[in-house]
Amino acid sequence: MENKLKNEIDKIFQYNNNESKKIIPKKIMIEVTNSCNSKCIFCANRKMTRKRKNIDRDIALKALEEGKKLNIDEVGFYVCGEPLLNPNLVEYIEMAKKLGYKYIYLTTNGILADKEKVKKLFENGLNSIKFSINSINPENYKKIHGVDCFNIVYQNLRDAYDVRNNSFKNCKIYVSYIKTKYNNFDDKEIKKKFSNYCDEIFIQQVRNQGGLISNIQSIKIDNLKITFPCYYPFNTVVITCEGYISACCMDFQNYLVYGDLNKDCLENIWNNNLIKKFRQLQMSGKLEKTICNNCINNTFDKCEPLDEKYSKVINYKNWENE
Ligand code: SF4
Ligand code: SF4
């Protein structure tokens, strides 16, 4: 882990000292859909004002092909929605595998991850699946996720673990748990509930998602320390369901979009002036008026998009009621 971190820092340091040197993205994340079948209290998805849609098939395939040409080895099929709602997901995973991606993964709320579906995902090349389960009992799950699906998800997790153990021993099953004041169970209890059915559990504090979780002060437990420069703009290509390219996977309103894959190629966009300028802002920490400033400081201040034509600009005064 330490080496990995050092490599990232070295890469950013090189970037700072030699702007003309091209940095190579490490992973690509594809928003196969921005729809979701949950309404988690800590997630901006429920208030997002972008049009709900599945990604166009041609754009998903273009992103995969061009990502591979840039020698990217990792692809994650989730961003701001629930990936299993997209009927083409298995085909995209199969395509990623054929193109030679070495690590293919996704995060799901698990509601649709029954054993047949998980088997298909693994058969076609998925390397890991992370179940986002943010409670340990049905009553509390309903409060946190906004849907009454704890028993379905818990059963799906156990079935997925069986499927993996029987036929896909090299694949991984993870659980992620976001803590707020309202699901603040002891870590030991959380581990006891899930550790027999997964390889690892990631327990994290809630983030304010670029400021869009405006009630963060009332739901957070501690102040989450976030440092800059943030790695996302330097190592991750995020393809939105509209086919845009964003600097961050928590960009619910497209405020960090810097190009359009419908109109240009991935390599040109990854190196365009807008993102280069933004990376310099990240390096210098002068992030005022960007959503990163809210993300780092846990604030809900008015921000401006990198390019208004791609974003769904919000009225910060009305956001609570939108
Ligand atoms: S955290 Fe995931 S499951 Fe919950 S609302 Fe957001 S996208 Fe949906
Ligand atoms: S909003 Fe900015 S600082 Fe926060 S995770 Fe995204 S890119 Fe990083």
Image: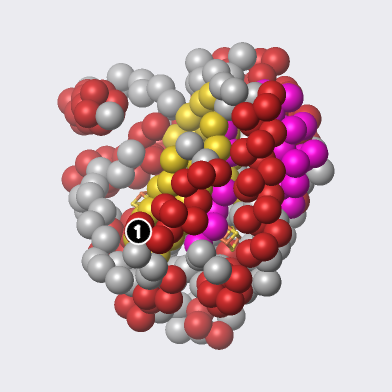
* Residue 276 x %, y %: 36, 36
* Residue 192 x %, y %: 44, 54
Residue shown at 68%/53% (left/top)? 155
Residue with the mark numbered 1: 187
Residue shown at 65%/24% (left/top)? 168
What kind of residue is marked 1?
A: Asp
As drawn, is 53 to the left or to the right of 178?
right
Q: From the image, which quarter does the C terminus lie in?
A: bottom right
Secondary structure type for disc 1: helix
Residue 4: which quarter of the image? Answer: top left
Which residue range is magenta in the image?
A: 112-134
Residue closer to the observer: 312 or 241:
241
Residue closer to the observer: 133 or 286:
133
Residue closer to the observer: 81 or 178:
178
Above or below residue 11? Residue 196 is below
> Mark 1 vs ligand 1: CB under 8 Å?
no
As drawn, is 296 to the left or to the right of 168?
left
As drawn, is 35 to the left or to the right of 271?
right
| 124 falls in the magenta region | yes
Residue shown at 59%/23% (left/top)? 169
Residue shown at 36%/21% (left/top)? 22
Query: What's the colour scheme?
Result: secondary structure
* Residue 127 appears in the figure: no
| 111 falls in the magenta region | no
* Residue 61 x %, y %: 72, 28
Give neighbour class at mark 1: few <14, some 14-19, many 20+ (Cα, 10 Å).
few
Q: From the image, which quarter does the N terminus lie in?
A: top left
* Residue 286 x %, y %: 22, 53
Quadrant observed for ligand 1 in the rendered image: bottom right
* Residue 74 appears in the figure: yes
